[in-house]
Amino acid sequence: MITSRAVSALIGVLALGLWPLVTGSFGVDLVTKTMIYAIVALSLELLVGTTGLVCFGQAAFFGLAGYAAVKLSPDKDAASLWWLLPACMAVGAGYALFMGALSLRTKGVYFIMVTLAFAQMAYYLVHDTPLGGGTDGIYLYVKPVAEIGSTLLLDLDKPMALYYFVLGSLVASFVFLALLLRSRFGRALAGIRVNEQRMRATGFSTYPYKLAAFTISGAIAGLGGFLFAVKDGFVNPELLSWHFSGAVLIMIILGGLGHLRGAVIGAFAFALLQELFKSEAVFGAFAKHWLLGLGLAIIVSVALLPRGLIGVGELLTHRMRRTPRNR
């Protein structure tokens, strides 16, 4: 039986698939970037909304994978997508495993501060050492390709090919997490979020579950970092800044915690709000103060929609079901 949620998800994927047919290069680039943000938001949703771990270091997994995409690519030849993508995801997962193994021994605000500290360590690693090119960043001169023998299957240097590859990556990430949350592992994570002490009393060793969730989250954020590096052909330390970790956290709160759809909706809402307040055509000279407008909009949204944007849809659906049909 096809549910209304599945139908809405299919409509969303179809709309994204048709989007390049009705817009120009700017629209394609904007939605490509937003879908990458949505992938990173999904990775954080696994920690915050599902497991109850408020991580403030998601930018580290994202940024390190982006740097890995550039550093591992040859200067003059295209790297193979078959090994470069898994390698970048492994970098994100590896740092998440390292961070989680130590930070998960703390709780509450201490956990938040420790994850932030680990993220800042990664930031200063690329900011203050020749490894990451300092504040200037480093460039990806030749983007990766997917080949079988001598047959070229995918060239990510082409905007349309990259767009649909990012769309496929977003759908794959969403489906993977949806299946994961329905498994025994996902139900254990939900139990940890509700009452970790009770889970321990029933015989669950919660630490390995949380560490596994942390590692999976790092791998998915690493996927986003790889895609962002390929899209821009450039990485700099700002990808690892705490500002980006905060932005991703705002995305999932804006969309609605506890829902994968909320993470995707929140990422699109955040990106659209950014573009709206940056528009001089709409706000004129005030557009240079777009951060102020964005902040006020987010405060109003959180105040009026405590369950996030996903709660609006659920409320409308509930009211429609309760409305008696005309006879």
Image: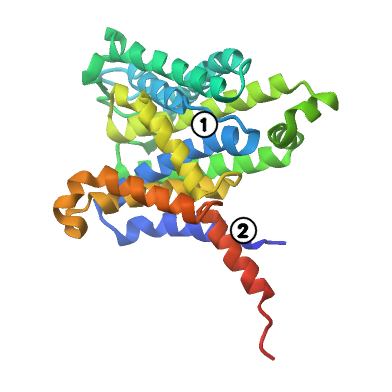
Q: Residue at x 64, y 43 (%)?
A: 178
Q: Position of residue 249 (x, y in %)?
A: 47, 37
Q: Residue at x 42, y 40 (%)?
A: 37
Q: Which residue is outermost to the left?
A: 285
Q: Is 195 situated left or right of 290 in this image? A: right
Q: Which residue is mark 2?
A: 5
Q: Position of residue 218 (x, y in %)?
A: 52, 25
Residue sitting nearer the eye, 152 or 247: 247
Residue sitting nearer the eye, 239 or 145: 239
Q: Position of residue 268 (x, y in %)?
A: 41, 50
Residue sitting nearer the eye, 6 or 243: 243
How much space separates mark 1 and mark 2, taking CA atoms? 23 Å
Q: Is 325 situated left or right of 21 in this image? A: right
Q: Secondary structure at mark 2?
A: helix
Q: Which residue is mark 1?
A: 220
Asked if 157 appears above or below 309 in the picture, the reply is: above
